Image (cartoon, rainbow, N blue to C red):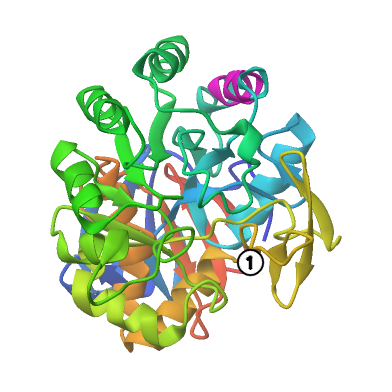
Amino acid sequence: MTGPGPTAPSGRWVLQAGTLLLPGGARGPGFLVIEGEHIARVEEGLHPNPDLSYPDSTVVPGFVDLQINGAAGCDFLQPTEAGLAAADTYLLSTGTAAYLPTLISAPEAQLREALSFFTEYARRPSAPRILGVHLEGPFLSPERPGAHRPEHLRPPSIEWIGRLVEDFRGLIRIVTLAPELDGALEVIRHLASEGMVAAVGHTNATFAEATAAFDAGARLATHLFNAMPPYHHREPGVVGAALADRRVTCSIVADLVHVHTAVLAQVAALKGWERTALVTDAISAAGAAQARVTLGDRTVTVTDGAPRLAGGTLAGSILRMDRAVHSMAGAVGAWDQAVRMASTTPARLLGLEQGELRAGFRADLVMLSEDQAVSAVVVGGNVVGRGGA
């Protein structure tokens, strides 16, 4: 798989494949006519003169990662140009066509420095695309900090988040917060009114408190089951509220460490693919040779297949998005549903016209081989990664 940068072709061109994963299901053979950054036509059958042909592959919508803290040695709280280039090359190899760099709780000056960096890069043509930033914190529960340093947490404040939103207009797309904290519901209403996605996570909320957050406009539960109270039949908590509410999308880390495969199947059965979003929650150790890395200002070591703090607390993952799809497909017995959880669902949550093979939608595509390996990636109509056409 080559790195970022269009290889061929450009303008108006035709992509032939053995199978297309269409909104109505897998069909094949079929072809796409790509014009500029978008899909101009979707047709079943064989094109007489395609520009690229993948007769043994399936074309699916490009994966969208709503929560990723870093990759290939690059910590998104401390990004560099070279580090981001390495991360982007790695992400393309996993089928990720677009993502939200995720910033955990940190001092405001450090958050602003990272936000300034991603403001610049979000304006550039890139592959994969930076869709904006996910702020995971700092309005989190001190009782459920996970890998966040408690000293970096702060009480919810419309004034504080409002300054960031104004100073980095259009960049912040998701904010994860604990809804039970004083002032959190007001912040949720403010975020929703500004067109951002308010998410509940790292929380000790009760069922009633979580439901109040969803009534206020929160529409996402961040890495369901993790950094929140377990489901209980007398107090269902955040998990129960999120699973029961049809307005809410649940993101889930399908690395088989954060969540058991049986639970993946249960979530999919309750929420459907339409309200289940696969995320990696990956950190800089993903795709990196070293087992010891940083997450913000904390040292993390990969042990037993996942990054952990010294005390054993999970600190993100080393999950690839294509492996997340594979694990979820195995859990639910429906590969097409798993693909949609990694593409269609996150795109819809952000209100984007992508994540589906549909005329007029953005041409962010992944070609998967018969064994579900990523063989090529198209971002915005350009072939940016190719493993043998």
Could you tell whether 255 is left or right of 285 in the image?
Answer: left
Please state the horizontal and vertical placement of residue 269, each as a whole percent of the image. Answer: 22, 79
> Foreground: 242 or 328?
242
Say if 336 sits above or below 72 in the image. below
Q: In the rendering, at what x and y percent does residue 369 appear?
A: 51, 78
226 left or right, relative to 115: left
Foreground of the two, 363 or 242: 242
Q: Quadrant of residue 290?
A: bottom right
Tell me where residue 46 appears, x and y as whole percent. 29, 73
* 127 relative position to 1: left or right: left
Residue for point 41% across, 78% down: 328
Q: Is residue 207 visible?
A: yes
Q: Residue at x 56, y 35 (%)?
A: 126
Q: Which residues are magenta?
A: 111-119
Residue assigned mark 1: 387
Residue at 36%, 48% (x, y): give it: 363
Tell me the quarter of the image containing the C terminus.
Answer: bottom right
- Secondary structure beneath dot 1 equals loop
**Closer to the camera, 378 or 271?**
271
Mark 1: give few (<14), some (14-19) or many (20+) Cα within 10 Å: few
Answer above or below: position of 67 versus 196.
below
Question: Magenta stretch containing residue 188, yes or no?
Answer: no
Amino acid on which the number 1 mark rests in the picture: Gly
Image location (x, y in percent) of residue 315: 65, 57
Secondary structure that dominates the magenta span: helix
